[in-house]
Amino acid sequence: MPNASRHESPGALCGMPRREFLRLGALGAAGLAMGDWLKLATFAQPAGAADKATAKAVIQLWMGGGPPHTDTFDPKPGAGDDYTGPYKRAIPTNVPGIQLCQTLPLLAQQADKFAILRGMTHFTRAHETASYIMLTGTLPSGELVYPSMGAVVALKKAYEGGYQGALPPYIAITRPPGRFNSAGFLDARCSPFATGGNPGARDFRVDGIVPASGMTTERLKERRALLESLDALAGRAELDAALREMDANQRKAYDLILGEAKEAFDLSAESDDLRDRYGRTTFGQSCLLARRLVAAGVPFVTVNWGGWDTHKQHFERMDKMLPDLDKGFSALLEDLHQRGLLETTIVVWGGEFGRTPKISKEPPWNGGRQHFCDAFSVVVAGGGFKGGQVVGVTDRLGEKVVKRPVYPWDLSGSIYKLLGIDPKGRLPHPHGCVAYVTPPVGGNVATGGLLTEIM
């Protein structure tokens, strides 16, 4: 692993008062405390750098597990059967010189609206670490657990940026994308509000509070019991006050979702024709819901679609998943464009890494693709990113970046910049540590810098 030591941490220990520890612990036990963001008027400050922003919102299409770059946005039709499998053709797009895999004919007609980052690369093939790197835009270290981009945007565009919307500033459809606490060292109010439910279902409704980070009912009970055991460490009144605050915040969140704001989640308000264009699938209707939410003023929406970890039966699964991706993603771009929202909405598609270009035909894989971080693709559109562009080049097999590598912090820093968030600015840390929006990367870790060629 490259040298990841790059944070300033004044003092050997960054202390937290006992009362604050109890309050954050109680709120964290529920996965997220969504009522906290109802207090955002208290935290509203002048927008500052946001006045120069070209983007107001982000829709993150998160393909959990790692989507295959050579079967989507970086085809290698001449690589041979051991690499292409049945997807042997690259098809032209509406931008001369740019080709996509044969699996994405609808997106091929929207290529003028997006840019392909074919030079994405990082250093790990482990899901958890790779997800952390891609979602936070930084390398892991033993000093700080960083917040996701969504949490940073919630802080900077909502709690510090004057957001006055009726909805949470960070919403995940249907669950948070990471295998870690999305808020990191930030306050729990920066965690995503997870909708639950299934937007593709006929009777979709928001289930209410869905615990972050895969929290189960049993784990919640265990954490509640642990918190109650803290009675031995602190006054009972302090603990009761923290738990009461948690319960009150949960009730506020439920009241909100059952109140006027629920109209933003009502997909039946859309025409049957438009819903059909997105596809009557979970992913398609999630994309439509994301468009409704940014139109309602939500700064960051994640559509979390897992199932891309295709070690086995890769092509059988891609035959089912890629048409849904093609339909939902292309409809989202077209819909945002037609409504004049694409100019101010960043859309970013990708996962924690890609898949091996060479197919694993041997047992037990029998035609799968494995984890691959050396070279993979991410797609960005809108909000100031120029469409019809390709950044980075991979070799003839798609196994190595040979021109313009793009690192996760290059991507996150560029997104922050377009949102009017200073990538070199600081984040508040509960221990008083020095933490940056985009941490400086040192040691032997390379960086390509902001994506100025498409900004």
Image (cartoon, helix red, strand yellow):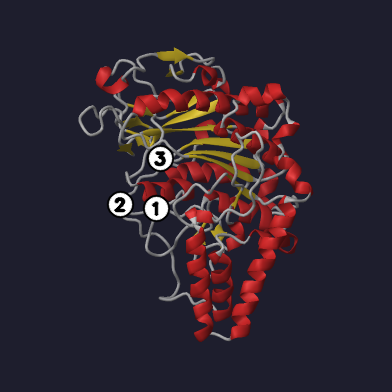
Of the 4 image quadrants, the one containing the C terminus is: top right
Dot 1 falls on a residue whose secondary structure is: loop
Residue 420 appears left or right of 429: right
Label drawn at residue 139: 1
- Measure the C-alpha gap from mark 1 to mark 3: 19 Å
> Vertical placement of 396 versus 65: above or below?
above
Can the viewer see residue 422 in this picture? no
Earlier residue among tags 3 and 2: 2
Tag 2: amino acid:
Pro
Among the 4 quarters of the image, the one containing residue 201: top right
Whether tag 1 and tag 2 are in contact, CB under 8 A, the answer is yes
Dot 2 falls on a residue whose secondary structure is: loop
Residue 411 appears left or right of 287: left
Whether tag 3 and tag 2 are in contact, CB under 8 A, the answer is no
Q: Dot 2 surroundings within 10 Å: few (below 14), some, or many (20 or more)?
A: few
131 and 25: which is toward the camera? 25
Residue 77 appears left or right of 323: left
Label drawn at residue 2: 2
- Measure the C-alpha gap from mark 3 to mark 2: 23 Å
Residue 423 appears left or right of 73: right
Q: Pinpoint residue 55: horizontal percent, then vertical percent.
A: 64, 40
- Measure the C-alpha gap from mark 1 to mark 2: 9 Å
Q: Residue furthest left?
A: 362
Q: Dot 3 surroundings within 10 Å: few (below 14), some, or many (20 or more)?
A: many
Earlier residue among tags 1 and 3: 3
Q: Residue at x 53, y 31 (%)?
A: 454
Tag 1: amino acid:
Leu
